[in-house]
Image: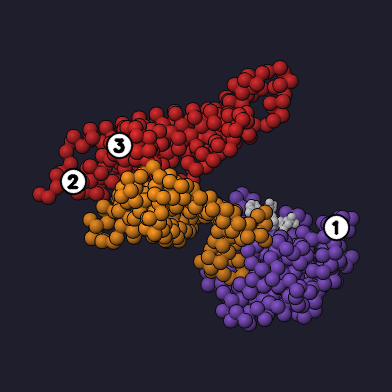
């Protein structure tokens, strides 16, 4: 026999790969959303000198291939700054920033879409700037943003497959290993594809429920 | 000849046409009158096969519109002008008019265009052959719509309230063209609220009342005291139309 | 400056890669539009099996990473006895993935076509196929220019992934240059700026085409 058959242990391998993919996805999502939100707030309050830089950087991130970004971070930065960087670190940094760039756009338009009148009305009620942000803008921006954010995250989940190229042992990398060992590409890549598909569907479904819940609460709790 | 026999049409539970019988001979201009919702448009859409019949039968020159082959032949024999023009928005006036002659009649492009330009000249739009619908006024669009129908050289022209989306001045332009067509002997089935115009050009008038065709008379008799006007519903309808 | 000094000796090689990227994207967008138009027409069909098949295709290829799709074809096709080059495989994979997105765009374009306009085409005796190809599709494509443009831009970005199956398009070529010069930062930084400029230029071009094609269209 030229190739080794599938073994029960391969299931464990797949689960490990899925675990790495999901962990990296969740981690970069949290970091990315936080950075994206911070950028949107900085942009909204016109922090001096911030706007052009934020826009330039996020546009560059959105308009260039993630693979190139990964190469720049994983191969380029260590060579340039003479530091060490592991594949996981490079992957986390790159995907987080990438998510942040897309999230920034969503948060920004979420903030913009809220009626200026409401903010003025709240100022009449004597709310401070930070209260307005916390009590009015944030909940509504969240409700407006969930739909597009879910779309972005479903996409980013797929983007994580690229980290296998710089050597992270995620689900796709496990696929590569099984593919080389078993020489059964159809089965291997169909199974890997199916797992990604199910993960994406689960994510989209959960996102839909969160969106519905948030919209409801904003409707009830609006000022 | 267009023949409708016991035509019925339902939308869900609503019976919109009830055993309608109608014959249109070549050379006739038949006007369909009736209140809003009485089923005039539906009858036209049954004749050109846009709605499937729920009962009865319609033939155009003997071609049964409820069969596939019959519908193809029936649509070759007739052409429709619509209330809201329904021009192809991505094509010029010329493109709108030549599409079906080229694709359906298989005319050479040059011949189809020559025919289209002649028609456009006739309706006073010779200079607008290259214009897109969006660049034309309502009245101009409807004249293109008429040219598009005529380019197929139909034996029957079906017109459903072709002036009701136009303001009075443009209505006049379009009606003049229709009057000329009638003089040339074009067979027309005509839905309109322009009573005076209908009286002028129709050879016959039929009246629809809640899906029933209750009166079918030559024009003179329809407007005679002892003819159509003797029917209370028609008298009421006409006097209401005059007031509007 | 230092970036240019690193790149300059390899500019010819990089331009070759760039040309390959352009060719791959052009072929893929044509493939994607053909496939997307076919899928969209299937999705607006009355037959539920036809509709179901088309929907499933769109759903699957939009929810599986492109890299996985690419490996599926790259390693899988030879198993079927189909031996085509990596470049051809890449173009096919990009067309299939792109088609899933294009079908969405065209379908919503189709739904914007006024039913009265279709009625007019029907009564004039045009066949169903002619109505679709001469009336419905051209109108749908015009209103779809913008979203179609973002799909093309995404294809440009996606094409960099072909470097993982040994295609030396722009990213593949840059990888080789980075390895030979030992200056990965300079090479990839330039590459990133190149891609970003290319896609930005594209989006300007798309806006211009949109305006031009929709000059005379209602509501456009
Ligand atoms: N597609 C449809 N689905 C359901 N009901 C319809 C449909 N088309 C027409 N109807 C109904 O059929 C009846 C007749 O409509 P039709 O459009 O034929 O009237 P009409 O005589 O042309 O009226 P109008 O003068 O306002 O144009 C109306 O009650 C209308 O609501
Ligand atoms: Mg009507």
Instruction: Compute the Cα span from label 3 to label 2.
Output: 21 Å
- Residue B159 is left or right of residue A6, and the answer is right
Q: Position of residue A6 (x, y in %)?
A: 17, 41
Q: Which chain is orange?
A: C
In the rendered image, residues at marks 3 and 2 fall on the same chain = yes
Q: Position of residue A30 (x, y in %)?
A: 44, 28
- Residue A160 is left or right of residue C154, and the answer is left
In the rendered image, residues at marks 1 and 2 fall on the same chain = no
In the rendered image, residues at marks 1 and 3 fall on the same chain = no
Instruction: Name the element at disc 3.
Output: loop
Tag 1–tag 3 contact (CB < 8 Å): no
Look at mark 3 in the image and give the residue it sits on. A168
- Residue beneath the point at 59% across and 21% down: A134
Look at mark 1 in the image and give the residue it sits on. B241
Instruction: Compute the Cα span from label 1 to label 2.
Output: 84 Å
Rendering colour (chain B): purple
- Residue beneath the point at 18% across and 44% down: A181
Can residue B82 be seen from the camera position used here? no
- Residue beneath the point at 29% across and 39% down: A167
């Amino acid at each position: 026999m030229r190739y080794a058959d599938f073994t029960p242990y391969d299931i464990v391998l797949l689960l490990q790969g899925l675990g790495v993919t999901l962990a990296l996805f969740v981690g970069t999502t949290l970091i990315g959303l936080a950075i994206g939100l911070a950028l949107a707030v900085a942009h909204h309050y016109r922090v001096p000198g911030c706007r052009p830089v934020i826009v330039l950087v996020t546009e560059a991130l959105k308009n260039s291939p993630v693979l190139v970004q990964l190469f720049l971070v994983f191969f380029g930065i260590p060579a340039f700054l003479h530091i060490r960087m592991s594949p996981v670190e490079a992957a986390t940094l790159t995907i987080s920033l990438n998510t942040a760039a897309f999230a920034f756009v969503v948060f920004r338009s979420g903030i913009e879409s809220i009626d200026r009148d409401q903010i003025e009305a709240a100022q009449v009620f004597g709310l401070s700037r930070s209260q307005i942000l916390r009590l009015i803008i944030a909940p509504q921006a969240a409700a407006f943003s969930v739909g597009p954010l879910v779309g972005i995250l479903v996409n980013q989940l797929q983007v994580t497959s690229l980290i296998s190229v710089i050597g992270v042992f995620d689900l796709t990398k496990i696929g590569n290993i099984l593919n080389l060992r078993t020489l059964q590409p159809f089965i291997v890549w169909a199974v890997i594809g199916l797992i990604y598909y199910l993960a994406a569907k689960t994510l989209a479904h959960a996102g839909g429920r969160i969106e519905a819940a948030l919209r409801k609460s904003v409707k009830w709790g609006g000022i | 000849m267009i023949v409708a026999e016991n035509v019925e049409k339902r939308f869900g539970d609503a019976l919109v046409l009830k055993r309608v019988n109608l014959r249109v001979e070549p050379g006739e201009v038949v006007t369909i009158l009736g209140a809003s919702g009485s089923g005039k448009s539906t009858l036209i859409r049954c004749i050109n096969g846009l709605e499937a019949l729920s009962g009865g039968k319609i033939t155009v020159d003997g071609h049964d519109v409820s069969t596939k082959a019959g519908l193809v032949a029936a649509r070759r024999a007739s052409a429709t002008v619509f209330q809201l023009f329904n021009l192809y928005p991505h094509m010029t006036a010329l493109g709108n008019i030549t599409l079906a002659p080229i694709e359906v009649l298989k005319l050479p492009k040059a011949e189809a265009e020559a025919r289209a330009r002649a028609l456009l000249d006739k309706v006073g739009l010779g200079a607008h052959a290259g214009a897109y619908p969006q660049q034309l006024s309502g009245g101009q669009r409807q004249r293109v719509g008429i040219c598009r129908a005529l380019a197929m050289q139909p034996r029957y022209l079906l017109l459903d309230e072709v002036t009701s989306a136009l303001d009075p001045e443009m209505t006049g332009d379009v009606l003049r063209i229709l009057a000329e067509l009638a003089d040339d002997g074009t067979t027309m089935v005509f839905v309109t609220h322009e009573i005076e115009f209908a009286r002028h050009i129709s050879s016959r008038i039929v009246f629809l009342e809640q899906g029933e065709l209750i009166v079918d008379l030559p024009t003179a008799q329809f407007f005679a005291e002892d003819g159509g006007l003797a029917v209370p519903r028609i008298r009421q309808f006409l006097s209401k139309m005059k007031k509007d | 400056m230092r970036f240019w000094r690193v790149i300059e000796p390899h500019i010819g090689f990089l331009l070759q890669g760039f040309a390959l990227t352009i060719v791959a994207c052009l072929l893929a967008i044509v493939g994607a539009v053909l496939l997307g138009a076919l899928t969209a027409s299937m999705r607006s069909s009355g037959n539920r099996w036809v509709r179901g098949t088309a929907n499933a295709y769109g759903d699957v290829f939009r929810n599986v990473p492109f890299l996985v799709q690419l490996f599926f074809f790259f390693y899988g096709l030879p198993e079927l006895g189909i031996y085509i080059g990596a470049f051809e495989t890449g173009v096919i994979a990009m067309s299939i993935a792109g088609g899933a997105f294009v079908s969405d765009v065209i379908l919503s374009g189709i739904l914007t076509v006024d039913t009265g306009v279709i009625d007019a085409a029907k009564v004039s005796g045009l066949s169903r196929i002619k109505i679709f190809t001469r009336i419905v599709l051209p109108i749908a494509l015009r209103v779809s220019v913008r979203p179609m443009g973002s799909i093309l831009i995404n294809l440009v970005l996606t094409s960099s992934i072909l470097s993982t199956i040994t295609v030396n398009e722009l990213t593949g070529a840059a990888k080789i240059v980075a390895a030979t010069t030992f200056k990965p930062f300079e090479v990839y930084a330039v590459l990133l700026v190149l891609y970003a400029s290319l896609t930005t230029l594209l989006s300007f071009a798309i806006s211009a085409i949109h305006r031009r094609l929709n000059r005379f269209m209602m509501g456009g």
